[in-house]
């Protein structure tokens, strides 16, 4: 009988099938190759694993290639043929009976395929020297819980399947996700080639890549540089390929698009400005119908043009129309009541101004742009199919009842947006520092992650110089816009390591008549301070942030004098050593610390900080007084840790400094003396040094 149709059974001490019928048992097959081709494979070599069963399958690391089937069986027919190994291809099929399957592998496998509602968990690390394939098909689920490392890897998820990787590291990763399927990635790759249907999911919150190439469908008239009807073009994360191309593209050998003039432009460069402007320029001061000057207070009512007769009516005179724009002056001294035709609806609000919308709105498109500290309140039901919002430092928008199909949101600096109602689709720039709050429902969100590129954007204007919003258009220029690095959200976590030169500011104490020595007091030699911990940093905006955390600090004071420990009134105290011994004496104070800093970014990476550090002294054998010296034929080490109890339990330091990025220079001074009741000496430690991570 062929090996592939045989199962090697481990039975319990020779019991027959009748003796364990309908009892849960585990059978084992040691996997051996049965080759029908001219190729030669080692006895248990496995290059290819195919799973065709919905019974849960677990793949673990093992000492040999073996497979186990657990279940309740009546005869060998219940599990016959549930696995075969031929020409290094292992196929796991559905047995007649069985509850779970465990596969143990002692070597790496480069190809995995899962079919027919497979449910597989791979709990071993996989290392692939060259190329590998991972494919889930036909409603299958595969979870790789170990590390996957390879040079060129292909991942395919088809027919409503899901495949997930806890950690993957590849040079080139080709990813194919069909409609209704999902791929979850954690790890990194140098080059990512993405072929994704619109109705599929690609989750990559903890996955990074250097270059992204997207698959593009080619029409018959397109220049085809590769087999099939797709070609991969280098792109950016936020640039999506169009659903239908209006014009055919000519593509050169480098994968770039040829223009009508013969110049080449990459797909990313061709679409960046269009895609960004879709989000940015629809909400711009240039598009405003109404300009509210800085610090003005205005209540606005919108009426149908048949009910108002004029473009606007105000209870006090306003500047009126300038170059087609309705303007309210800067620093308007009165609370203004303004009634406007409802087709004049796009509003720009200057610094410090506040606008209340007192009427219902039901429109197709509207845009509102707010400068620093401006406020806009919608006090009635607001229905807008496409709503564009631009918010800057400290601005606030509030909707009492909003219904919108699409909302385009952009911002610069920390602002607040209160939403009450429902939004179909929210398109926002994920680093815009806009806080969303209120009772709202959003069906879907697109968060753009912008890289560096060149666009034309309006320059902010000042209406106090009688320049209206159109002057911004005349002065617009091409400028670089660079987003914050991916992962730099409002709350960041960093590790901190610091080193400083340590000293103390002191005056001699006469307690217990110590210091009777002619030297008069202890003299410090080279001393140092070490700190280690973690920091949480919260960014209020681009310039201001606050950080705290938890840390450890070790202060080591070294003395030039020969010192020793003595008993004074039942407590251990430091005194001068009058013997002829040459000793090395030091005092070690260790603390658990709680820092609090405020940091201000002056320019680019240069920052300054100020704050305080609280500390709690903890007594251990390594905290306290230490002395080392030599005697004939021996070296003596004295450690007076828990017996030396003169440190104050708490300390408080103030610190200030400056730095570049995460490298900071600091000066620190203790406002609380170090010893209880100023025993030994009234000492106030200080240090200057450098830290990484603040």
Image (cartoon, rainbow, N blue to C red):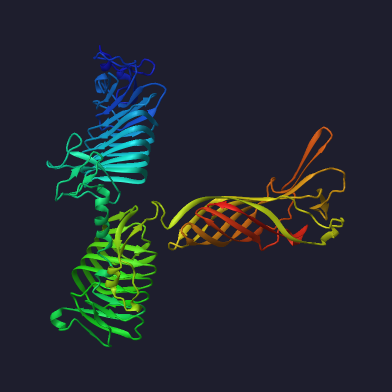
- Where is residue 70 drawn, in percent x and y? 33, 27
Instruction: State left or right for residue 649 relative to residue 534.
Output: right
Q: Position of residue 580 (x, y in %)?
A: 87, 44
Q: Is residue 27 above or below residue 311?
A: above
The residue at 27%/34% (across/down) is 135
Would residue 556 be seen by someone viewing this image from the given angle?
A: no
189 displayed left or right of 614: left
Depth check, front residue: 623 or 275: 275
Choose between 29 and 675: the one closer to the eye. Answer: 675
Q: Nearer the viewer, residue 467 or 608?
A: 467
* Figure check: 545 above or below 470: above
- Please indicate, yes or no, whether residue 267 appears anywhere in the rendered image: yes
Residue 83 placement (x, y as % from top left): 27, 22
Quarter that holds the N terminus: top left
Residue at point 23%, 47% (across, down): 263
Q: Position of residue 520 (x, y in %)?
A: 84, 58
* Depth check, front residue: 501 or 629: 501
Q: Name the quadrant containing residue 652.
A: bottom right
Name the quarter where the C terminus is drawn.
Answer: bottom right
Residue 391 is left or right of residue 628, and the answer is: left
């Amino acid at each position: 009988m062929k090996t592939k149709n045989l199962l090697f059974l481990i039975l319990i001490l020779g019991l027959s099938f009748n003796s364990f019928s309908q009892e849960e048992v585990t059978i084992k097959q040691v996997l051996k190759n049965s080759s029908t081709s001219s190729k030669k494979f080692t006895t248990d070599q496995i290059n290819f694993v195919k799973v065709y069963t919905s019974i849960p399958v677990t793949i673990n690391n093992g000492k040999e290639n073996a497979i186990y089937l657990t279940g309740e069986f009546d005869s060998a027919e219940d599990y016959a043929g549930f696995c075969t190994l031929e020409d290094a291809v292992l196929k796991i099929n559905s047995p007649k009976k069985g509850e779970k399957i465990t596969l143990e592998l002692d070597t790496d496998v480069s190809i995995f395929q899962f079919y027919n509602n497979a449910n597989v968990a791979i709990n071993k690390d996989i290392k692939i020297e060259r190329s590998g394939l991972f494919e889930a098909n036909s409603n299958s689920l595969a979870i790789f819980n170990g590390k996957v490392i390879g040079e060129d890897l292909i991942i395919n998820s088809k027919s409503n399947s899901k495949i997930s990787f806890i950690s993957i590291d590849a040079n080139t990763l080709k990813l194919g996700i069909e409609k209704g399927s999902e791929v979850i990635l954690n790890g990194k790759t140098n080059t990512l080639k993405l072929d994704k249907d619109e109705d599929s999911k690609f989750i990559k919150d903890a996955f990074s890549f250097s270059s992204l190439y997207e698959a593009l469908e080619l029409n018959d008239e397109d220049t085809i540089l590769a087999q099939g009807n797709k070609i991969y073009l280098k792109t950016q994360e936020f640039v999506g390929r169009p659903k239908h191309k209006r014009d055919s593209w000519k593509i050169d050998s480098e994968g770039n698009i040829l223009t009508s003039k013969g110049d080449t432009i990459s797909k990313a460069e061709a679409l960046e400005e269009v895609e960004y402007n879709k989000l940015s320029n629809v909400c711009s001061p240039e598009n405003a119908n109404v300009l509210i000057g800085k610090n003005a207070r205005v209540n606005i009512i919108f009426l149908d043009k048949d009910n108002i007769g004029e473009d606007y009516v105000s209870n006090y005179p306003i500047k009126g129309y300038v170059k087609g724009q309705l303007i309210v002056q800067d620093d308007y001294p009165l609370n203004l009541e303004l009634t406007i035709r409802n087709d004049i609806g796009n509003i720009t609000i200057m610094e410090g101004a506040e606008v209340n919308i007192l009427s219902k709105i039901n429109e197709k498109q509207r845009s509102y742009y707010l400068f620093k500290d401006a406020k806009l309140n919608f006090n009635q039901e607001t229905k807008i199919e496409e709503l564009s919002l631009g918010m800057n430092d400290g601005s606030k928008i509030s909707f009492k009842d909003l219904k919108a199909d699409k909302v385009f949101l952009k911002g610069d600096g920390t602002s607040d947006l209160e939403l009450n109602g429902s939004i179909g689709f929210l398109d926002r720039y994920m680093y815009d520092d806009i806080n969303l709050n209120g009772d709202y429902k959003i069906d879907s969100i697109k968060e753009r992650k912008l890289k560096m590129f060149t666009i034309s954007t309006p320059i902010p204007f000042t209406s106090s110089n009688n320049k209206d919003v159109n002057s911004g258009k005349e002065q617009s220029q091409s400028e670089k816009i660079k987003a914050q690095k991916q992962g730099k959200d409002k709350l960041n976590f960093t590790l901190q390591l610091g080193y400083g030169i340590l000293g103390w500011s002191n005056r001699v104490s006469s307690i217990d008549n110590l210091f009777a020595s002619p030297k008069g007091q202890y003299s410090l030699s080279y001393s140092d301070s070490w700190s280690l911990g973690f920091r949480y940093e919260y960014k209020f905006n681009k310039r201001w942030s606050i950080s705290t955390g938890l840390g450890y600090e070790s202060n080591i004071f070294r003395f030039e004098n020969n010192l020793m420990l003595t008993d004074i009134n039942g407590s251990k105290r430091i005194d001068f050593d009058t013997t002829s011994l040459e000793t090395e004496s030091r005092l070690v104070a260790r603390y658990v610390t709680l820092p609090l800093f405020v940091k201000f970014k002056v320019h680019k990476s240069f920052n300054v900080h100020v704050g305080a550090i609280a500390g709690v002294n903890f007594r251990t054998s390594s905290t306290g007084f230490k002395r080392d010296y030599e005697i004939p034929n021996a070296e003596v080490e004295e450690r007076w840790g828990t017996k030396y109890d003169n440190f104050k339990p708490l300390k408080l330091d103030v610190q200030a400094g400056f730095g570049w990025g995460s490298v900071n220079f600091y000066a620190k001074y203790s406002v609380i003396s170090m010893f209880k009741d100023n025993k030994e000496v009234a000492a106030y430690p200080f240090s200057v040094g450098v830290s990484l991570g603040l």
